[in-house]
Image (tube, rainbow, N blue to C red):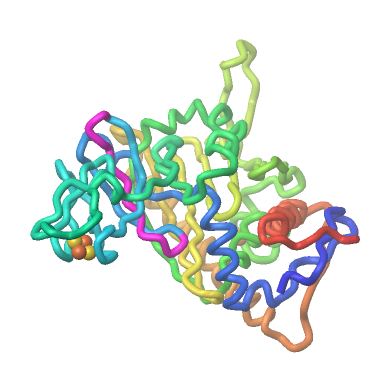
C-alpha cells in the first residue's frame, strides 16, 4: 500500500492514507525499513559503565545484546546463539563471558565464540566462523543507541545540532530517575503526529494552554529531527539568564526535540524527559516515558518532581483519549486523508515526508 503520492509542498499536501495506520503489512514494512534502519535506544549508559556489563533488548523484532567489552568499548550484537538460535544473554548484568541459556555455548564480550561443550567430531566447524553478528552502537547523553543497519547516517549526523544545543544540561551526567509506561490503542504514528503539533493544545490541554505562549509556539524542521519552541508564560521559573554569550539574554529553557522516527527529548530546566514510541501492533503502541535527573538530585527535587509527574500524566491522559479516538476515526468508512494547517502542522508534514521517503512512497508527480 504505497501506491499513493505525497506532496512535499505543505500547502498542497494531503496526510497519509488511513490504511498506513491500520495495515499489518505496513507495520511489517516499517519494522524493516524504519525501525530496522534507524538509531533506536537500546538502554542507558549507566547500565554499561563497567567492563563486563551487558544489557539485552529487542529492536525491530531482532534480539539485541550490548556489552562493555574488555577493551572498554561498547559493542552491540545479535543476541541469537549461532548453534540453534538460543538466547546468548537474558536481562542485564555483569559477566566475564556470556553463556547461551540453551546448551551452554559461551561467547566473549567481543562476540567471539569461545566454548562449545560436547562438540568434538563436528566436521568443518571453526569457532572463528561463528562470531555473533555485530551492529552499530553509539551514545548520546545517558542513552545507548543501536542501529541494525550497517549503512546510513551516524547518530551524530541524525542528531545534528541537538548535542550542542543541550550542552548546558550536561546530558551525559544525567541518571534515570523514573519510568512510566503507557499502552495505547492506536498506531505509533498517531501518537507521533499528535506530539508534533501544538494545534491541538487549546482544545485538548486547557491547563497546558494556560501556561504556554500559544501565539509564539512554532516547529522548526531539520533533516532527521524537528524542534518545538513552546515558550512558557510564567516567567520566573521557566526563563533563565543565559550568560554563555557574555551578554545576559532571556531564553526559554524548555526544548522539545523529536528525532525520526520515534524518539522525543524534552529538556526542562532541571531534567530531561525522554519518550520512546514503540509499535506493539498496527493499532497498539507502547509509549515509555523516562525522566533523567542530575545526580545528586537538587534539594527541592521531590516536591517539584511529584508535581511534574502529575502534570505530565494529566497531559498524557488527554493525549491518550484523543489518539485512541483518532485511531477509531481512521477506521471510518468515510475518512481517508486530510489536509495540514500550514501554520501549525509543518512538523507532522515533515514526519510524513520522511516516512514516505524511507518507506518508498514517491512524491506528487
Ligand atoms: S542454542 Fe545456544 S547453545 Fe544451543
Ligand atoms: Fe498533546
Picture quarter with the N terminus: bottom right
From the top left corner, tell me how far across and down residue 109 is, in percent: 24, 42
**Which residue sits at x=32%, y=50%?**
132
Instruction: Answer whether residue 351 is visible to the viewer in this image.
Output: yes
Along the viewing direction, whichever of 31 and 126 lies nearer the viewer? 126
- Report the residue that reaches farthest toward the bottom: 333
Along the viewing direction, whichever of 356 and 199 lies nearer the viewer? 356
Along the viewing direction, whichever of 91 and 128 lies nearer the viewer? 128
Q: Is residue 49 above or below residue 259?
A: above
Q: How many labels does the image show?
A: 0
Q: Quarter of the picture for ligand 2?
A: bottom right
- Residue 5 is left or right of residue 54, and the answer is right
From the top left corner, tell me how far across and down residue 21 is, in percent: 64, 73
User: What segment carries the magenta color?
Assistant: 60-71
- Report the residue that reaches farthest toward the left: 118
Quarter location, residue 319: bottom right
**Which residue sits at x=42%, y=46%?**
135
- Report the residue that reaches farthest toward the top: 246
- Residue 306 is left or right of residue 5, and the answer is left
Q: In this view, does 170 lie above or below 99?
A: above
From the top left corner, tell me how far across and down residue 15 is, in percent: 77, 66
Q: Is residue 340 above or below residue 281?
A: above
Amino acid at each position: 500500500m504505497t501506491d499513493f503520492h505525497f506532496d512535499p509542498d505543505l500547502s498542497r499536501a494531503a496526510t497519509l492514507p488511513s490504511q498506513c495506520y491500520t495495515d499489518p503489512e505496513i507495520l511489517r514494512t516499517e519494522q524493516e525499513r524504519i525501525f530496522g534502519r534507524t538509531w533506536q535506544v537500546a538502554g542507558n549508559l549507566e547500565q554499561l559503565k563497567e567492563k563486563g556489563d551487558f544489557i539485552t533488548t529487542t529492536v525491530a523484532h531482532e534480539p539485541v545484546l550490548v556489552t562493555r567489552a574488555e577493551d572498554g568499548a561498547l559493542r552491540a550484537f545479535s543476541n541469537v546463539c549461532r548453534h540453534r538460535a538460543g538466547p546468548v544473554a537474558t536481562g542485564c548484568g555483569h559477566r566475564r563471558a556470556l553463556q547461551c541459556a540453551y546448551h551452554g555455548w559461551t561467547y566473549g564480550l567481543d562476540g567471539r565464540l569461545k566454548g562449545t561443550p560436547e562438540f568434538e567430531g563436528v566436521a568443518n566447524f571453526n569457532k572463528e566462523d561463528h562470531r555473533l553478528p555485530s551492529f552499530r552502537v553509539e551514545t548520546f547523553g545517558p542513552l545507548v543507541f543501536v542501529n541494525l543497519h550497517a549503512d546510513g547516517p551516524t547518530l551524530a549526523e541524525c542528531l545534528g545540532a541537538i548535542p550542542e544545543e543541550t550542552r548546558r544540561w550536561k546530558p551525559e551526567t544525567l541518571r534515570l530517575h523514573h519510568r512510566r509506561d503507557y499502552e495505547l490503542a492506536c498506531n505509533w504514528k498517531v501518537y507521533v503526529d499528535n506530539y508534533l503539533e501544538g494545534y491541538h493544545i487549546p482544545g485538548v490541554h486547557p491547563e497546558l494552554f494556560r501556561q504556554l505562549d500559544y501565539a509564539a509556539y512554532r516547529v522548526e524542521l531539520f533533516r532527521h529531527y524537528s524542534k518545538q519552541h513552546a515558550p512558557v508564560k510564567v516567567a520566573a521559573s521557566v526563563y533563565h539568564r543565559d550568560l554563555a554569550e557574555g551578554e545576559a539574554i532571556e531564553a526559554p529553557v524548555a526544548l522539545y526535540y523529536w528525532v525520526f522516527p520515534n524518539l522525543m527529548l524534552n529538556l526542562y530546566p532541571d531534567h530531561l524527559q525522554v519518550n520512546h514510541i514503540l509499535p506493539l501492533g498496527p493499532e497498539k503502541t507502547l509509549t515509555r516515558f523516562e525522566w533523567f535527573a542530575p545526580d545528586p538530585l537538587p534539594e527541592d527535587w521531590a516536591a517539584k518532581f511529584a508535581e511534574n509527574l502529575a502534570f505530565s500524566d494529566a497531559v498524557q491522559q488527554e493525549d491518550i483519549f484523543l489518539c485512541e479516538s483518532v485511531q477509531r476515526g481512521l477506521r471510518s468508512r468515510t475518512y481517508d486523508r486530510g489536509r495540514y494547517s500550514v501554520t501549525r502542522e509543518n512538523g507532522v508534514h515533515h514526519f510524513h515526508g520522511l516516512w514516505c521517503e524511507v518507506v518508498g512512497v514517491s512524491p506528487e508527480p
